[in-house]
Image (tube, grey):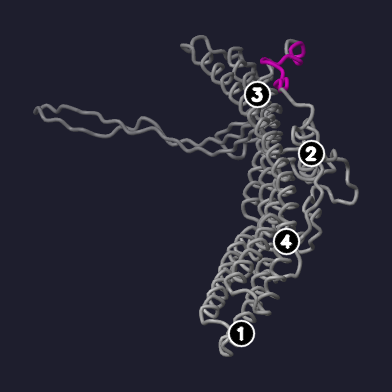
Amino acid sequence: MLSLALAGCAIGPDYERPELNTPAAFKQAQGWKAAEPADALARGAWWELYGDATLNELQQRLENANQSLAESLAQYREAQALVRGTRASFFPTLSGNASKTRSGEGTGQSTVRLADGSTVTSGVSTGGISTSYDLTFGVDWELDLWGKLRRQLEADNASLGASAGDLAAVRLSLQSELAQNYLQLRVLDEAQRLLDATVAAYARSLRLTENQYEAGIVPKSDVTQARTQLKSTEAQAIDLKYQRAQLEHAIAVLIGVPPAEFELAVVDSVPQLPAVPVSLPSQLLERRPDVASAERAVMSANADIGVAKAAWFPSLSLSATGGYRSDTLSQWISTPNRFWSIGPQFAMTLFDAGLIRSQVDQAEARYDQTVAAYRQTVLDSFREVEDYLVQLDVLEQESGVQQEALEAARESLRLIENQYKAGTIDYNSVVSVQTAALSNERTSLTLLGSRLTASVQLIAALGGGWDGVAPEQERLAGSE
């Protein structure tokens, strides 16, 4: 009756989400549309926003073969097993034992004094060898009077949720890293095409200048300037090959293959910058896996306080033992050789010099730590989104101005080359304009790469994907 009366009782505080100062909207979100379900986009496959089939394939290979992801998945399975083990503690434990024992008593010594004064020592048997057979079954069950086991299960379930959040955070981080590396590689391919085309144009200019020099139209300094410019640009083109190889190697490791066995073919286009919607701050808290993991850590720490406080109260265990014991095998399993015992056991710590109090204080301190860590994680998540929003906004403005500069540089180059061919200017003017034009072309590509990278980082900061609040937990739940 006592256990029934206390069945709903659990020592320790019930969990309440820590209070947060959540803004109503992002400061830098002007002009961005709010996130809404995108039926055409697979759940969580945010990289499909870039419309690149190769990137889609690489993301699938990462899911199947990345070793960091495999490590995190194994940690999640460990947390699942821990919950199953804790849940098993609610049920009785049945044990069994069968044994055969041979035992004997030792031999003593006796001393006899003879008439002539001498002594004689001899062995005296004090026992014999015996055999016993035992078959024993036992049942032990600890009743959860004060909710200690329930709080422990609550803590382990919260830890399991935190592990799921950690797994989702690792997956999102790796997906983001892969997307950034891939997009930067494609920007480098575009830069390589630009430099190769520029090298070809400079080579034609060098041949033209050499012909004009041989005809006595221009001085030799024009030839040396043209050759210097050509070789300098060739060196820049060669340097890009090293940078591209580094990105290709990084992608190979992310998808779980040795760099020597992986190669990405050059393509003729760069993925377009997608329109990235911005979620509301409240959705951000639900979507980001690191925020979810941090909150579940708070839940686990809160339950641990109840586990620690339960040590102040007595524990009640029920145990029963029964079986058969005999000196002969033939009479082993028979009614006369049967034995049994049953009874409850109360156990309680009467004096521990403050040990339990210190354990409760430790649990409460850990809870305060997790609350602070949770709030800091939320603040960091807001900061990251604000940073990437303003970065994309500034880069967009910069790209617009840079495009105007690029068009002006191209027009200036066209005019200056015509003037040089007509002999109205020297080659120094041509070199200066060509250098400015190439610099503006490369700056435009650099800005494109920065905008693509910032878009991936913003998506990751928003938790990835747009059509589900907790896709990771749903996916894992469906796989159990």
Q: Which mark is residue 320?
A: 3
Question: Where does the magenta region start and end?
Answer: 4-20
Residue under circle 4? 408
- In this view, the residue in front, 432 or 15, is 432
Q: Nearer the viewer, mark 3 or mark 4?
A: 4
**Residue furthest toward the left?**
116
Q: For numbered disc 1, what is the local secondary structure? A: helix
Label 1 and label 3: CA atoms lie apart by: 102 Å
**Residue furthest toward the front?**
424
Kind of residue at disc 2: Ala
- In this view, the residue in front, 322 or 112, is 322
Q: Which mark is residue 207?
A: 1
Kind of residue at disc 4: Ala
Q: Which mark is residue 470?
A: 2
- For label 3, the crowd category at 10 Å Cα-Cα, with few meaning under 14, some 14 to 19 and many 20 or more, is some
- N-terminal of the pair, mark 3 or mark 2, is 3
Residue 393 in the image: above or below residue 336: below
Residue 5 image position (x, y, % from top left): 76, 11
| Residue drawn 78% across the image and 37% down it | 29
Residue 114 image position (x, y, % from top left): 14, 28
- For label 4, the crowd category at 10 Å Cα-Cα, with few meaning under 14, some 14 to 19 and many 20 or more, is some
